[in-house]
Image: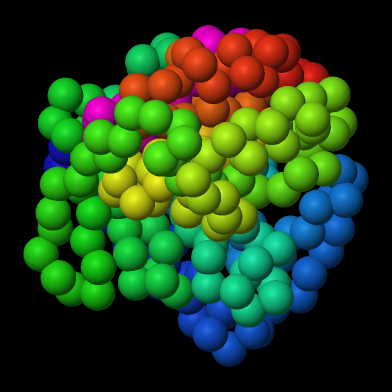
Amino acid sequence: MNDLDLAIELADLADGISLPHFTDQDFTVETKPDLTPVTECDRAVEKAIMDRLAQARPDDSVLGEEFGSHGDSSRRWIIDPIDGTKNFVRGVPIWASLISLYDGEEYLLGVVSAPALGRRWWAAAGQGAFASALGAPAKRISVSEVDRLSDASLSYASLSGWKELGVLDEFLELAESMWRTRGYGDFYSYMLLAEGAVDLACEPELALYDMGALAPIVVEAGGAFTNTVGLPGPFGGNAVASNSRFHESVLDRLGRVAPKETE
């Protein structure tokens, strides 16, 4: 089984655990030390993925949100079992399992599976980005061709993080200069970007497991994915993703501010 087929299998495994719990709202919620919620479903999904990887790719390393890092191979699976846990616990269907594979800092693949939306996105290095919906045939996706901020749509998660980063005024000025803004949030902003439905997505503070699966899909769809300084990929502590046509201008308008922390 090749890596992408295995990643799709892992997404099926995750969906089979998470969706019934979400549909029935059958779980308990705890609070982690960083005050974010976690459910037993998060842990069950991550453990199931880790167990399958131990069988199928025993020499690879794994980084997961709930159980941390295991192994020292340069080939590393990066897992966020449920991205959008706050949505999950409130019954909002915008959440997904994020699965990616990197060799060092080079992406090999990314898969985003959002079963409550009936949507899945995936990409492998050099092979393009794809999406499917509710049993429909998969289709190749690409970013938009909008080339002016005044014609562009922005998707973001919240305003508080930009205030903490010290560039709330700059972010608001950027938003006001654009045609449309909506707070779709979490993984969904970046998948809409990859599909060409929005043109810019950004968040001021993210972990590697939040971004690992997003970057390959955005880049393979023709977009750009960096942090606020301009460092490519998901390793810079936050994200600015665009259709690539005005990416540098956006970074300039945000002051190329460094994230609070980087991984």
In the image, residue 260 above or below residue 143: above
Q: Which residues are magenta?
A: 215-231
Percent position of residue 203, x then y = 63, 36
Percent position of residue 186, x then y = 58, 50
Q: Residue furthest left?
A: 137
Q: Quadrant of the C terminus?
A: top right
In the image, residue 20 above or below residue 63: below
Task: Please give the name of the residue rendered at 25% of the width and 34% of the height, measured from the top-left corner.
Answer: 145
Magenta-colored stretch includes residue 199: no
Percent position of residue 40, x then y = 68, 66
Percent position of residue 5, x then y = 20, 46
Along the horizontal axis of the image, is 25 left or right of 97? right
In the image, residue 174 above or below residue 46: above
In the image, residue 150 above or below residue 183: above
Magenta-colored stretch includes residue 230: yes
- Asked whether residue 110 appears in the rendered view, the answer is no
Task: Please give the name of the residue rendered at 36% of the width and 15% of the height, measured from the top-left corner.
Answer: 106
Nearest the viewer among 108 and 180 is 180
Nearest the viewer among 62 and 20 is 20
Nearest the viewer among 53 and 37 is 37
Nearest the viewer among 210 and 195 is 195
Q: Quadrant of residue 14?
A: bottom left
- Asked whether residue 226 appears in the rendered view, the answer is yes
Q: Residue furthest bottom?
A: 24
Q: Quadrant of the N terminus?
A: top left
Task: Please give the name of the residue rendered at 41% of the width and 71% of the height, measured from the top-left corner.
Answer: 117
Along the horizontal axis of the image, is 58 left or right of 62? left
